[in-house]
Amino acid sequence: MNTCGGSTKPDRKTIERNRRIHMKRLCFKLDALIPKHQNVYRDATNQRDRLDRAASYIMQLRERIEELKERRQLVMCIKGINRNMRDSMKIDDVGLPVLELRDSGPNLEVVLISGLNKSFTFYEIICVLEEEGAEVVNASFACVGDRIFHTIHAQVKCSRVGIETSTVSERLKEVVHSMNPTSFASGSRMGGESGDIQDDQPIRIN
């Protein structure tokens, strides 16, 4: 060490030795942060290898963080959409249930929208369709907000005989009316005033 004016200044060898010791400690600390399953060569003494593994692990963590951020944003976006949908669907059940019958030649589609608190037997509508000469192909339902959407797809059993859609409409109206007698006013539409039903046109009961 050199002495100048009573002060002691470490020589270059001492500075370099202290630097190496400090770097070695930092490398061991960094190495200790890497999980065991990520650090296969933990016992390796090569400092460069340790730094390379640490850098690789840090890059993996950074990519993982970005992925989680994107997921979080997606989840928040979906929650916002669901919240908006629930808010838009939260209306009085005065206009429910709603039934739509779409006649497209040999195919029939029935959509029933009801509230969660409405007592409804799904099979009654299926029975009406089958009794009137239609064969149910599939039926499903989904809950959206405080509403239940029932969907039935059917086909005419005998294309030569066909199906009397006006009769089906009246019977479906009776079934839906039994769910909530106050939901239908005297002016409820049922295919128009004349009762004529056009193909591919929905018949809405509300």
Image (cartoon, rainbow, N blue to C red):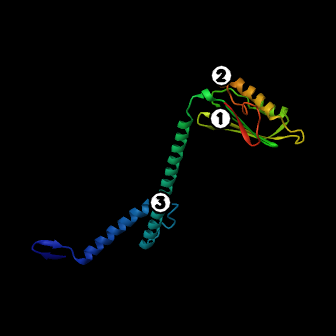
Sequence order check, earlier mark of 2 and 1: 1
Category of crowding for the residue at label 2, using alpha-carbon neighbours closer than 10 angstroms: few (below 14), some (14–19), many (at least 20): few
Q: Quadrant of the C terminus?
A: top right
Q: Residue furthest right?
A: 160
Sequence order check, earlier mark of 3 and 1: 3
Tag 2: amino acid = Thr
Q: Nearer the viewer, mark 2 or mark 3?
A: 2
Circle 3/circle 1 CB separation < 8 Å: no
Sequence order check, earlier mark of 2 and 3: 3
- Percent from the top left, x then y, of residue 64? 49, 58
Left/right of residue 96 with respect to residue 47 in the rendered view = right
| Closer to the camera in the image, 43 or 143 | 143
Instruction: Name which quarter of the figure residue 136 lies in.
Output: top right
Q: Which residue is the site of mark 1? A: 148
Q: Which residue is the site of mark 3? A: 61
In this rendering, the answer to whether 176 lies above or below 27 is above
Category of crowding for the residue at label 3, using alpha-carbon neighbours closer than 10 angstroms: few (below 14), some (14–19), many (at least 20): few
Tag 3: amino acid = Leu
Q: CA distance from mark 2 to mark 3?
A: 61 Å
Tag 1: amino acid = Ile
Q: Which residue is the site of mark 2? A: 182
Q: CA distance from mark 3 to mark 1?
A: 44 Å
| Closer to the camera in the image, 19 or 172 | 172
Q: Residue furthest left?
A: 5
Mark 3: which secondary structure? Answer: helix
